[in-house]
Amino acid sequence: MTTLLETAQAAAQAALIPSELTGARPRRTAVSKEDIPASIIAWILIALALAASIWAWNHTAKILHSRAALRVDGRLTYGVVTEIYKSTASYGFSVDDRSFTGDALIPRSNRRTFDRYDRIPILYLPSDPSINHPAAWEDSTGSAYTAFILPCMIAFFVPFILVLSRRERQVVAEGLPAVAVITGFRRGKGGQIVDYEFRTAAGQLVKGSSVDSRPWTVGASLCVLYLERNPRRNLQYPSTHFVVVG
């Protein structure tokens, strides 16, 4: 018995598979015009991650060096907490009638009992009182490493984006074309998700999906590309990010 999928594929095979997909593989590919801004953003993120990592490294090294100097040469005085913001405290103190300020992460053990205008012991360098730290909050040294949070977040997403981009480009360059039939729709984070299924050249029935906001109907046909060695890696063509050139 002829299925809906087989009927749709037979009728749409010639019309739906573009001529650029029938030549030799691997195909030459290029970033689509619509995706150029996204590619620029990806490279900007890479540059930001590098710059932020360099800054974080220098910032952390400076803080740790200051902490070490305070342990060796620091002098003790008392200051007053001026502001509290979530887990961070700002404080002020005086040395030789000159006022200085500082900020530090409040240790977890002090957060419930700590308040504004509390008096706290401060270690400072006599040669430069602007280098200072609460004497009893040595564990807040860990706050030096918070500078790496942003670079790490960027560094996590950039490789993720690059891997996805490389995988999509590989399917566009090496994939076999096929005609798929739409089997349904659902909502996703990127918008409407179109579910489809197709048969490979070897006769295997494979399912796939893509984000597509166009008004498709169940039973409509579209062109897909799939990797012969792993048909589950497939995508709708034209691809979102890459086009075949030459």
Image: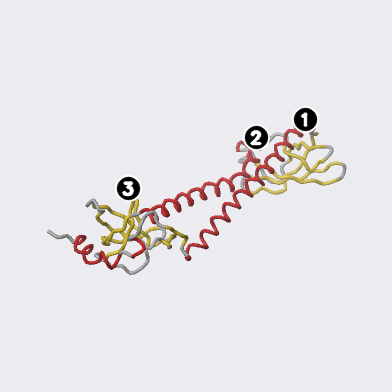
Task: Give the residue at x 14% y 60%.
Answer: 2
> Which residue is at 67% across, 44% downward?
115
Q: Are the residues flagged by discs 3 and 2 in contact, CB closer than 8 Å?
A: no
Among the 4 quarters of the image, the one containing residue 113:
top right
Q: Residue at coordinates 35% horizontally, 61% vertically from top-left?
A: 21
Estimate how packed mark 1 is, as few (under 14), some (14 to 19) or many (20 or more) residues with alpha carbons within 10 Å.
few
Look at label 1 and name its amino acid.
Val
- Judge depth for marks 3 and 1 and give the one in front: 3
Q: Secondary structure at mark 2?
A: helix
Q: Quadrant of residue 138?
A: top right
Disc number placed over residue 139 in the picture, else none:
2
Q: Earlier in the sequence, mark 3 or mark 1?
A: 1
Label 1 sits on residue: 72
Q: CA distance from mark 3 to mark 1?
A: 62 Å
Question: Which residue bears the numbered disc 3?
Answer: 230
Q: Secondary structure at mark 1?
A: helix
Q: For label 3, count other residues whose C-alpha is less than 10 Å away and answer few (under 14), some (14-19) or many (20+).
A: few
Q: Nearer the viewer, residue 163 or 145?
A: 163
User: In the displayed structure, would residue 132 be above or below residue 222?
Assistant: above
C-alpha distance separating marks 1 and 2: 17 Å
Q: Badge 2: how crowded within 10 Å, few (<14), some, or many (20+)?
A: few
**What type is the residue that disc 2 sits on?**
Asp
Q: Nearer the viewer, residue 229 or 157?
A: 229
> Residue 39: image x %, image y %?
52, 58
Instruction: Estimate the x, y position of residue 150 in percent, counting from the top left.
Output: 59, 48
Q: Is residue 86 visible?
A: yes
Looking at the rendered image, the quarter that the C terminus falls into is: bottom left
